[in-house]
Amino acid sequence: MPPSLDPPPLVWALLGHRAGDNAQIRALAEALTWPVETKQLEWRRPWPLWSPLYGRRRSLAPLTPVARDALGPPWPDLVVAIGWRSVPVANWIAAQKDAAQVHLGRPRAPFEAFDLILTTPQYGLPPAPNVVRLPGPVGGPDMAAIAAAGDSWQPRLAHLPRPWIAVLVGGSAPPLTFGAADGARLGKAVSAMARAQGGTLLVATGPRTDPAAAAALTARIDGPAHLFRWDRPGDENPYLAYLALADAFVVTGDSISMMHEASRMARPLHVFPLRRRIPALLPPLDNLPGVATLRRQGLVRAPRRAEAFAAALIADGRAVRLGDPWSGPPPLQPPDPLDQAVRAVHEMMQRRH
């Protein structure tokens, strides 16, 4: 870690309307170990329509009067934000004191407006001096919470034959779809996998899992299993315990968070690819001449592709497609994205200092 700054910089963490985004902002801001103030952004409706000029603005106009009134001196030395709606607000705040700007994800704005962009594989941002690609999102459940859940659940699952194969199920996330036919296909595949190994399935569905898909999945399971269905309230969610205890994982390819969290366990990870609701009519723009330059200028939006995140895991040797065998030993513990993000922010602030 670079030497500490004296005095330590004041950080403003800009929170928005998405809980997952806010969790990432809080995790990074707190891990920096500098003074932090959180600022809740609330936007006037209707939200401004996206245009190539929007990300170039410095303006508080998109905010509600209450949110605007909460922004005042002393101004921060560092602004941490996420989401395209935050960009003109973060630009305006940073201009009050020439503060540094860190943006998580994809800013949909000229890269040059930011001191640092912390992105992840699903966005496919082109390389730039201020872009750092992390192996996954920052934040998420910490290892202590996962271990505690495992200790709690171990006695309840001890009677089930090993290996334990955790099946973590998401759901439809346009353009990907996960319906009853897909649930049946997954149930058949994981049951065959468990039979071949003489093990047990630990199955958990999620809030996006369609009840018909969950029913079709569970109907095709024909061996030892422990089941948790999100659409049947009252049961204790064993998700963290599954992360702690499973010997291998099968994760549906729609959920970046579940794929990332399972990969952190450094055990075999099998990704179940989902179908596209509508087949892609055109090839990805990434390889077309000039597209990378247009994305760096904020003129062409980088898409969010869960398939790209899964492909990065596979390319790094941390996952395989369900049905493909492991060709080597279990994967190594991946780098912690939060540690990498903190290091990148500290180094950037040292350069500015």
Image (tube, helix red, strand yellow):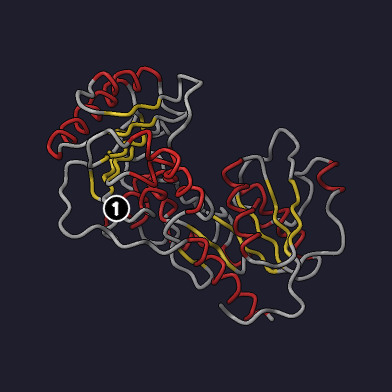
Return the residue nearer the eye: 240 or 157. Answer: 157
- Residue 9: horizontal and vertical position, in percent? 74, 71
Residue at image coords 64%, 75%: 349
Return the residue nearer the eye: 330 or 52. Answer: 330
Residue 77: image quadrant is: bottom right
- Residue 107: horizontal and vertical position, in percent? 57, 55
User: Looking at the picture, which amino acid does disc 1 mark?
Assistant: Arg
- Residue 262: horizontal and vertical position, in percent? 37, 48
Left or right of 347 in this view: 217: left
| Figure check: 175 above or below 291 | above
Q: Which residue is mark 1?
A: 267
Q: How many marks?
A: 1
Report whether residue 312 is seen: no
| Figure check: 137 above or below 237 | below
Q: In which quadrant of the rendered image does the C terminus lie? A: bottom right
Q: In which quadrant of the rendered image does the N terminus lie? A: bottom right
Left or right of 294 in this view: 331: left
| Figure check: 323 above or below 102 | above
Return the residue nearer the eye: 139 or 159. Answer: 159
Mark 1: secondary structure: loop
